[in-house]
Image (cartoon, helix red, strand yellow):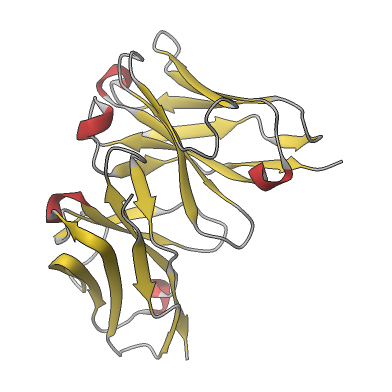
């Protein structure tokens, strides 16, 4: 069964850091780009970051550039989102999502999603 | 950056009726890059339609997508109780990679 298990969320103070993880199973991990999408409470979906199957190519939303870093460990079938300088408006459920292709530019949809992990930024 | 505007914000219908949800792009887009997702409360979104009109196997043929250029629609015929959810359209681009509409909430009347 194709599955994404995202974890690592929690309560963090403004200016703090957190690392999210997403463990993949049931498919050839290196064949797919991976992404993070977030959803603030009661709000819509916002794409945050993506990484190609090899890990050589990354992309970020303007709202998180310089503060969030995506990476992947293909030996562990895991993608990460390192979050720093967190702000109150980063509070959201963060979903790990699989792109439909290997490369960022060829992944036109997000075809498998994790259940999400909640990040709360508050003092 | 392409902006997607969905309408209506909320749609109230009864089981058995048909629903038409709209997604308008701020500029003409290729059908290849337009998708729809369904999200139920407390759950992750699920891919429903890709390439504007191709339905994933997880959904019945009561769901159909259409449109071109700047105007796209998701039609759900013979609404079932499990169809009531929030629906998002999405465009795949280069920067940002993915843009979502604000969503249409389909609720039971």
Query: Picture quarter containing residue A103?
Result: top left
- Residue found at the far top of this picture: A75
State which quarter of the image contains the N terminus of chain A: top left
Q: Is residue B31 above or below residue A7?
A: below
Question: Where residue A114 sits in the image (x, y, percent)?
Answer: 47, 40
Q: Say whether residue A10 is visible.
A: yes
Q: Is residue B17 above or below residue B104?
A: below
B100 or B38, nearer to the observer: B100
Query: Picture quarter containing residue A14?
Result: top right
- Residue found at the far right of this picture: A123
Question: Where residue A7 sits in the image (x, y, percent)?
Answer: 60, 31
Q: Residue at x 20, y 33 (%)?
A: A106
B89 or B106, nearer to the observer: B89
Q: Residue at x 32, y 22 (%)?
A: A52
Question: Where residue A104 sits in the image (x, y, percent)?
Answer: 28, 29
Decide if residue B32 is on the left or right side of residue A98.
Answer: left
Q: Residue at x 67, y 45 (%)?
A: A91
Query: Picture quarter containing residue B16?
Result: bottom left
State which quarter of the image contains the C terminus of chain A: top right
Q: Is residue A30 above or below residue B58?
A: above
Decide if residue B47 is on the left or right side of residue A92.
Answer: left
Q: Say whether residue A1 is visible.
A: no
């Amino acid at each position: 069964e194709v599955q994404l298990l995202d974890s690592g969320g929690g309560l963090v103070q403004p200016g703090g850091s957190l690392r999210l993880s997403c463990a993949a199973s049931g498919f050839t991990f290196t064949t797919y780009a991976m992404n993070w999408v977030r959803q603030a409470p009661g709000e819509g979906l916002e794409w945050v970051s993506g990484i190609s199957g090899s890990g050589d190519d990354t992309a970020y939303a303007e709202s998180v550039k310089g503060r969030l870093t995506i990476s992947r460990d293909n030996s562990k079938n895991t993608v990460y989102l390192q979050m720093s300088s967190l702000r109150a408006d980063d509070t959201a459920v963060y979903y790990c999502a699989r792109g439909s292709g290997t490369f960022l530019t060829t992944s036109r949809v997000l075809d498998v999603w994790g259940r999400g992990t909640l990040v709360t930024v508050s003092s | 950056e392409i902006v997607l505007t969905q309408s209506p914000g909320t749609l109230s219908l009864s089981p058995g009726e048909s629903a038409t949800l709209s997604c308008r792009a701020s500029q003409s887009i290729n059908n290849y890059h337009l998708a729809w997702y369904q999200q139920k409360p407390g759950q992750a979104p699920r891919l429903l339609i890709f390439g504007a009109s191709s339905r994933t196997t997880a959904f019945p043929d009561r769901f159909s997508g259409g449109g071109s250029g700047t105007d796209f629609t998701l039609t759900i015929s013979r609404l079932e109780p499990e169809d009531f959810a929030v629906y998002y359209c999405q465009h795949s681009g280069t920067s940002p990679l993915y843009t979502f509409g604000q969503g249409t909430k389909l609720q039971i009347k």
